[in-house]
Image (cartoon, rainbow, N blue to C red):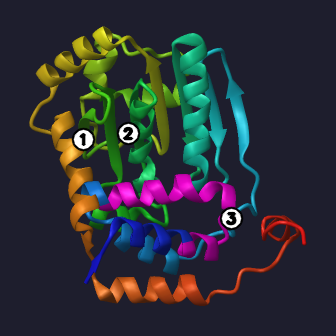
């Protein structure tokens, strides 16, 4: 069966609300799931598998800041979904990049790492160079699902190259730079760092990193060419026109999805009763 892009927004938002996501986090989370569907065709299937997997209730554990420096922040996600933690982490990296030129966030103990790649695209839309990397531990609950559908480690680099779409480089493994970022919040996108960012490693430290750097259009163009030259067989490189083509096809043609995955998701999203709270009642509508 085929779904339009708008239909996936409705489906994903109802499912996430049924899973306990707060209203304010829905838009960012849905964009992340849609990205996985647009770029890799696995957003819906992974959401269905995660829906059935045991997980702590959203908001049941506190996310904490472990370390803060001038350019970086280390976050303990306490088992919460990357769909909830990721957009906030990107906002932190964005703020530091705009104020200091560089913003780095490292995240430990987060689930649903597959969807983090969308943050690189979101950062590029903000005019920032961004690298996102992650590595799931071999014994993590989602490790098997990630290995079957995607990869337990991943690296994504996105550079703003025009007004609509970024230059996109993706690697199906965590890079050599990942462990450096997990232990240090001061690494910049130097020539050596870029080499490390495009060097895959077999098994990196579990966790995720986000690096955002403020650059001029001229610097971004120069950096983009350097990355094109450095990209090897282990990387997938998409030019801005190709990224725009993926988005355009999603809008024009929608997605072909498996009914065996769609209908359980739809039933769950449409039939789950969400407990009322003071917060939800305040958002129900204008006072009569």
Tell me which numbered mark, 2 or 1, is placed earlier along the sequence: 2
Q: Which residue is mark 3?
A: 58
Q: Which residue is mark 1?
A: 171
Around disc 1, counting alpha carbons within 10 Å, would you say few (fewer than 14), some (14 to 19), or many (20 or more)?
A: many
Q: 114 or 247: which is nearer to us?
A: 247
Query: Label 3 vs label 1: CA separation?
Result: 30 Å
Q: Which residue is mark 2?
A: 121
Query: Label 2 vs label 1: CA separation?
Result: 15 Å
Q: Which residues are magenta?
A: 14-37
149 versus 104 height, above or below: below
Residue at x 28% of width, y 59% of height = 251
237 versus 221 height, above or below: below
Q: Position of residue 40 (x, y in %)?
A: 26, 58
Question: Magenta span has 28?
Answer: yes
Residue 199 appears left or right of 174: left
Q: Is residue 78 visible?
A: yes
Q: Position of residue 5 (x, y in %)?
A: 35, 65
Residue at x 71% of width, y 34% of height = 66
Which quadrant of the view contains residue 235? top left
Q: 157 or 136: which is nearer to us?
A: 157
Residue at x 43% of width, y 77% of height = 48
Instruction: Tell how many labels.
Output: 3
Of labels 3 and 1, the one closer to you: 3
Q: 128 or 56: which is nearer to us?
A: 128
Around disc 2, counting alpha carbons within 10 Å, would you say few (fewer than 14), some (14 to 19), or many (20 or more)?
A: many
Which quadrant of the view contains residue 24? bottom right
246 versus 57 height, above or below: above
- Dominant SS of magenta comes to helix
């Amino acid at each position: 069966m085929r779904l339009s892009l708008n239909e996936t927004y409705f489906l994903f938002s109802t499912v996430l609300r049924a899973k306990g996501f707060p209203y304010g986090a829905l838009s960012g989370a849905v964009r992340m799931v849609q990205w996985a569907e647009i770029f890799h065709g696995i957003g819906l299937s992974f959401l269905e598998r995660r829906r059935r997997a045991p997980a702590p209730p959203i908001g049941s554990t506190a996310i904490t800041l472990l370390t803060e420096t001038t350019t970086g922040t280390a976050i303990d996600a306490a088992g919460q979904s990357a769909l909830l933690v990721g957009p906030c982490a990107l906002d932190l990296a964005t703020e530091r990049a705009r104020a200091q030129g560089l913003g780095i966030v490292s995240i430990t103990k987060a689930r649903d790492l597959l969807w983090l790649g969308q943050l690189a695209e979101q950062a590029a839309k903000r005019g920032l160079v961004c690298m996102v990397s992650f590595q799931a531990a071999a014994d993590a609950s989602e490790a098997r699902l990630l290995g079957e559908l995607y990869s337990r480690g991943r690296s994504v680099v996105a550079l703003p190259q025009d007004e609509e779409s970024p230059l996109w480089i993706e690697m199906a493994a965590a890079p050599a730079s990942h462990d450096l970022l997990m232990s240090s919040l001061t690494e910049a996108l130097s020539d050596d760092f870029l080499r490390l960012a495009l060097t895959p490693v077999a098994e990196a430290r579990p966790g995720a990193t986000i690096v955002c750097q403020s650059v001029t259009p001229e610097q971004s163009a120069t950096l983009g060419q350097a990355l094109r030259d450095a990209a090897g067989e282990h990387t997938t490189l998409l030019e801005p026109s190709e990224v725009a083509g993926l988005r355009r096809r999603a809008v024009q043609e929608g997605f072909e999805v498996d009914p065996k995955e769609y209908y359980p998701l739809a039933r769950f999203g449409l039939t789950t009763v969400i407990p009322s709270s003071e917060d939800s009642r305040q958002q129900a509508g204008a006072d009569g």
